[in-house]
Image (cartoon, rainbow, N blue to C red):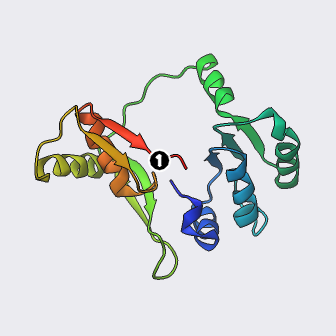
Amino acid sequence: IPYYNTLGDQAMRYITKQTEIEVIIIDAVQGLKDFNRDVLSQQETCVKHVVMIDKADSDAAFYKEISEKYNLQIHSFAEIESAGAENPVDHTPPKPDDVNVINYTSGTTGDPKGVMITNKNFVADACGALYMAPRPFHKDDVWYSYLPLPHVFERMVQVVMMQVGARIGFYSG
């Protein structure tokens, strides 16, 4: 369930509560501070684990405070990768009707609405984009990613670009 703080704090709380999300992946300490301010400190949640992409040792005291206050574990992405390498499991290929993602609307007309998108939906969307584009996509193409990554159109275009071996440029502040 991708979501981002530009949805607004009320939408973040709503989605967190409705989905009973237990694991959240956050980029860096500022993201965790925002999530604490907008969600954790405002309501009880089911969050049990936070995975930090960039878990800086200099923020250890903050991580400890959050972990103890909300009874959750904070992991680095490297720790998750190591645990996976040490405990391999057999690959289970996805099925076409498996849910790929629950995508939420922005909530501009009330509470955000979650839409379950299956693998079949996602592949059909990307194939439709390849077929309906005004010109074919090529490996020399470059997509400048300007929408938030959780946006369904942004993800579809990225899948198309990966299918043809093209490049994707990301804005980084």
Q: Position of residue 125 (x, y in %)?
A: 24, 52
Total numbered labels placed on residues in the image: 1
At 77% from the left and 42% from the top, the residue drawn is 73
Looking at the rendered structure, the kind of residue marked 1 is: Tyr
Does any portion of residue 97 appear in the rendered image? no
Q: Position of residue 164 (x, y in %)?
A: 22, 33
Q: Position of residue 44 (x, y in %)?
A: 76, 65
Q: Residue furthest top?
A: 86
Q: Residue furthest bottom?
A: 109
For the residue carrying disc 1, how many other residues have a C-alpha within 10 Å: few (<14), some (14-19), or many (20+)? few
At 70% from the left and 64% from the top, the residue drawn is 39
Q: Quadrant of residue 13?
A: bottom right
- Figure check: 94 above or below 21: above
At 69% from the left and 27% from the top, the residue drawn is 79
Does any portion of residue 139 appear in the rendered image? yes
- Which residue is at the front of the view, 127 or 153? 153
Q: Quadrant of residue 147?
A: bottom left
Q: Position of residue 64 (x, y in %)?
A: 87, 43
Q: Quadrant of residue 146?
A: bottom left
- Figure check: 170 above or below 132: above
The residue tagged 1 is 171
- Figure check: 96 above or below 70: above
At 26% from the left and 42% from the top, the residue drawn is 160
- Which residue is at the front of the view, 44 or 32? 32
Judged left or right of residue 53, residue 131 is left
Secondary structure type for disc 1 = loop
